[in-house]
Image: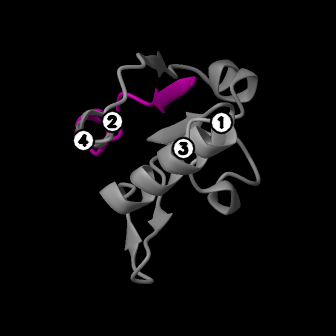
Amino acid sequence: MRIEFFYWENCPSHPEALERLRQVMLEEGLVDQVEVVRIATAEDADRHRFPGSPTIRINGEDLQPEGAQGQTMLTCRTYHTETGRLSPLPTATMIRRALQAARRADGGG
């Protein structure tokens, strides 16, 4: 499984999001490494199709694809949580569901 974490340094929520991702991976028994990618310039944002910080992709798929459409930019990102609220971080539930779906797609049950 390929897990990528993209962030913009000026986004204050990225450290907590990375910690949450790693915690959920641990709880799910995943030992895969997270590829952490710092987005520093508009060119970086374009090259990585970066919709904002933090962005998590699993096997190339955005954790919340509907939030990843549109322009690339150096900005913070918001997520629509399972409770219908906006959050600067993906929830542990969102991360867990995406990891489990990727595991099933990879044939891992």
Q: Is residue 78 visible?
A: yes
For the residues bearing labels 3 and 2, Cβ distance under 8 angstroms:
no
SS at mark 3? loop
For the residues bearing labels 2 and 4, Cβ distance under 8 angstroms:
yes
Residue drawn at point x = 52 percent, y = 22 percent:
39
User: Of callouts 2 and 1, which one flags the residue occurring earlier in the amino acid sequence?
Assistant: 2
Vertical arrangement, residue 43 with respect to residue 25, above or below: above
Residue type at the position of mark 2:
Met
Name the residue tied to disc 2: 25
Report the span colored magenta: 1-22
Name the residue tied to disc 3: 52
Residue type at the position of mark 1:
Gly
How crowded pointer 1 is (Cα within 10 Å; few <14, some 14-19, many 20+) is rated as few
User: Of callouts 3 and 2, which one flags the residue occurring earlier in the amino acid sequence?
Assistant: 2
Name the residue tied to disc 1: 107
Front-most of residues 18 and 33: 33
How far, Cα to Cα, is label 1 from label 3? Answer: 31 Å
Nearest to the eye among marks 2 and 1: give it.
1
